[in-house]
Amino acid sequence: QVQLQESGPGLVKPSQTLSLTCTVSGGSISSGSYSWSWIRQPAGKGLEWIGRIYTSGSTNYNPSLKSRVTISVETSKNQFSLKLSAVSAADTAVYYCARERPTRDGNNYLGGFDIWGQGTMVTVSS
Amino acid sequence: VIWMTQSPSLLSASTGDRVTISCRMSQGISSYLAWYQQKPGKAPELLIYAASTLQSGVPSRFSGNGSGTDFTLTISCLQSEDFATYYCQQYYSFPWTFGQGTKVEIK
């Protein structure tokens, strides 16, 4: 059973770079046609998709964050990572990593984030 | 960007009730829609994908309907464990976006 686990500092100073890693266990990050996403949720608010990566290295980012976001993958470690630069208090949130299924599989419609990490709280404060 | 209007934002109901949550898109997305359930302090869980397909392990009292711009999530007979917040999510066009959420609370 594939599981995801986020790790990284829980406190980041304003203007610095937030760095998080998601470790995939119970299976290879390279198996299947999945993509691997980061999603965040400020306290008491809704979900915001940050971006995703395939193990090929191909990425898609949310335009609202694109200038500050880098997502990378390290298949040998079964991990993918998020870097968010020039953070401010507005970036304070719970950050989730998640596995996304391909939109189509032959004639079958799929899609959706089927596996999520437990989430990690990141606070931006001096 | 595809904007999503999810309603209601708060739904008060009793165990055994049938409840319906709506999600309306700013443009058509075919059937590229998912529904999630989130309980306090937990990650969301996938309930439905492709607008109407039940994720493995999800009880059959959950159902999804719709295509194009209008979608619904129905819980046919609300159970105590169903009191939670529900989100719709489109994966038709980048960036992927989520609805604002519907909190289902005990009346």
Image (cartoon, coloured by chain):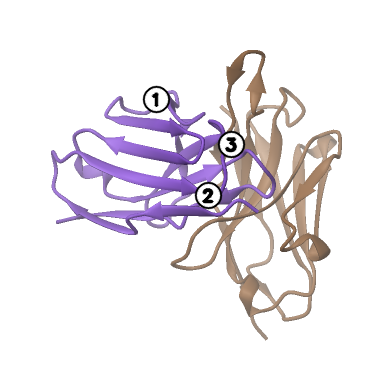
Chain colours: A brown, B purple
Per the model, the C-alpha gap separating discs 3 and 1 is: 17 Å
In the rendering, at what x and y percent does residue B42 appear? Answer: 44, 51
Q: Amino acid at mark 3?
A: Gln
Q: Nearer the viewer, residue B9 or B28?
A: B28
Q: In the shown orientation, is residue B14 left or right of residue B4? A: left
Q: Chain for mark 1?
A: B
Would you say the residues marked 3 and 1 are in contact, meaning their CB atoms lie under 8 Å apart? no
Q: Which residue is depicted at the point 32% across and 50% down? A: B84
Mark 3 lies on residue: A3
Q: Please check whether the numbered discs 3 and 1 fall on a single chain.
A: no
Mark 2 lies on residue: A118
Q: Amino acid at mark 1?
A: Gly
Q: Quadrant of the N terminus of chain A?
A: top right
In the rendering, at what x and y percent does residue A4 appear? Answer: 61, 41
Q: Residues within 10 Å of mark 2 (few under 14, many from 20)?
A: some
Q: In the shown orientation, is residue B17 left or right of residue A81? A: left
Q: Is residue A9 above or below residue A14?
A: above
Label 3: element kind: strand
Mark 1 lies on residue: B57
Q: Amino acid at mark 2?
A: Gln
